[in-house]
Image (tube, rainbow, N blue to C red):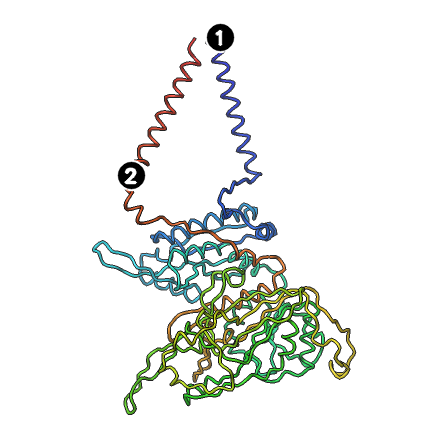
Amino acid sequence: MSALSTRNRSLTEFAIGIVVIVLLAYISNFVHFRLDLTAEQRYTLDNTTKEVLSDLDDVVYVRVYLDGNLPMGFRRMKRELKELLDEFSVYGERMIEYEFIDPLAAVDKAERDAFVRDLYDRGLEPTNIQERDPRGGTTQRAVFPGAIVSYKGKEQVVNLLKNNPAISGEENINISVQGFEYTLISTILALKPIELPKLAFVHGHGELDELETGDIAQELVKQFEVHRVVLGGEVGGLNPYSVVVMAGPTERIPEADKLVLDQYIMGGGNVLWVVDGVNVSVDSLSQGSTTLAFPNNHNLDDMLFKYGARINPTLVQDMQSAVIPVNVALEGQDSKFVPAPWVYYPLLNAPSTHPVTRNLNLIFSRFVSPIDTVGMNPSIQKQILLSTSPYSRTLNVPLFINLRQIERSPLESEFNQSNLPVAVLLEGVFPSAFTNRPLSSLNNGQAFSFHEASVPTKMVVISDADIIRNEVSRRPDGAYVTPLGYDRYSRQTYGNKEFVVNAINYLNDDKGLMNLRTREFKLRLLDKTKVLEQRVKWQVINLTIPSILLLIFVGIWLYIRRKRYTV
């Protein structure tokens, strides 16, 4: 073969290679391809996410306040979020735009403080981190692991960090990363200019008032059109509502109103039942140190039993409990309050096996009752959402409760009941609680179409109204609503708000969006002991092996080239 023909063939191969590269680059502008080799498919978007992104008709702008000199864990959060937003941008046909902002970038201290204060006032929750300074000391500064999402003139604040004090910082960051897709997609859906589903808080039977449910209602208005309704015995009055919340009734509910609720469920309505099994006056307890616990006569037992749940009129005590302030001063001395565990305030466990409760902090409760799942109806599936610790017990009522009981340390041997259910999810086809009952006197005497069985639907039964109740501080200038789940004595925020919002979203979910919360990214941490022991070994391997492989490759390439072009 002549040198000229060899040269021409090389030029031809080179030209073909250039054309192929150009064509691949051109095609890649229209075809998105990504190979996800991770075991949990962590870089593959859910079909629901792709559907939401492809339906955008305007730009979604995301301002992420996670930039600057960040610790390693927050840098990983930033990297994971940036990769997710890039993926969103591809499937959203460039309708997703974002920027990362350092909230502490301003040189002027007054300007920086004003910016940080504005972020806090808008709802971004800071977290304090400790850093080592060059002199060996430590300093604290605030990090805002959150974002503000804007769409069509509306915006919503998103706090990205799940801060559960019961687990390590690395695990909290990993849980936060797992929730990025669900958090951002649910925020975009809430901002879309569509007709919001309607949600009703029932009142008229001694339920929690607007202030006591003020914080959860304020959170729900981001996703629902929230109303407070009186049933009035009118069947069909609840039909416009996607979800109905019965929050803490203390008065006997008449049969006519129960029929309204029953037929709403038969038509496919979803109900969140938050019903105390036992009445206890916390005000009486704080003022007189003693109060009486007695069964709550709400008249819902027969309905709930028919649907598959029974709230027992007993009280739970749990060694895993919150604290209350107790005056330990002697008589005649100034008051001295110290926090002490109070077994009537269980801290409830939320299993990680269901999208409603996955990765939640402990749930704060007060004077809670156990729930039994009853009946063998195969059309109804039952799932426990909240339960007590392995060290709990129940007490029958009527029962006198005295604060001086705190002075007696609980004995572990007495707390011999484990994982008592206090919140249950029921799904399926429910029978009517009014089948074979006379109905002529109900519905205000008006005829209606009675349904004996429901279409497939869902309900959640919770046996403690305090799970949805926020504290209210009465002041001369008005009332102040404390965030739901915040405990002023331990200064910790429990998972109550997120649990209630998740439960309501699950009841209303017709897109399968809540399934995004079941995604799990395994935290694969290095063994620190082995890292220290084998540090030199792996440094040598990492420095020498790549160089040796490169030399071998170059040698093989030179040999092939010499063999090929030698005449």
Picture quarter with the C terminus: top left
Residue 1, disc: 1
Q: Could you say where residue 159 lies in the image, as x and y percent from the top left?
A: 45, 61
Where 126 falls versus 94 (above or below)?
Answer: below
Residue at 52% x, 80% y is 314
Q: Which of marks 2 and 1 is nearer the N terminus?
A: 1
Left or right, 314 with respect to 532, comes to right
Residue at 58% x, 69% y is 460
Q: Element type at marker 2?
A: helix
Where 254 falls versus 412 (above or below)?
Answer: below
Q: Could you say where residue 391 lies in the image, as x and y percent from the top left?
A: 43, 71
Give the residue pinned by disc 2: 537
Instruction: Classify 10 Å Cα crowding around label 1: few (below 14), some (14-19), many (20 and above).
Output: few
Along the line of sight, the residue nearer the viewer: 106 or 515? 515
Q: Do the residues labelled 2 and 1 touch (CB within 8 Å)?
A: no
Left or right, 332 with respect to 180, comes to left
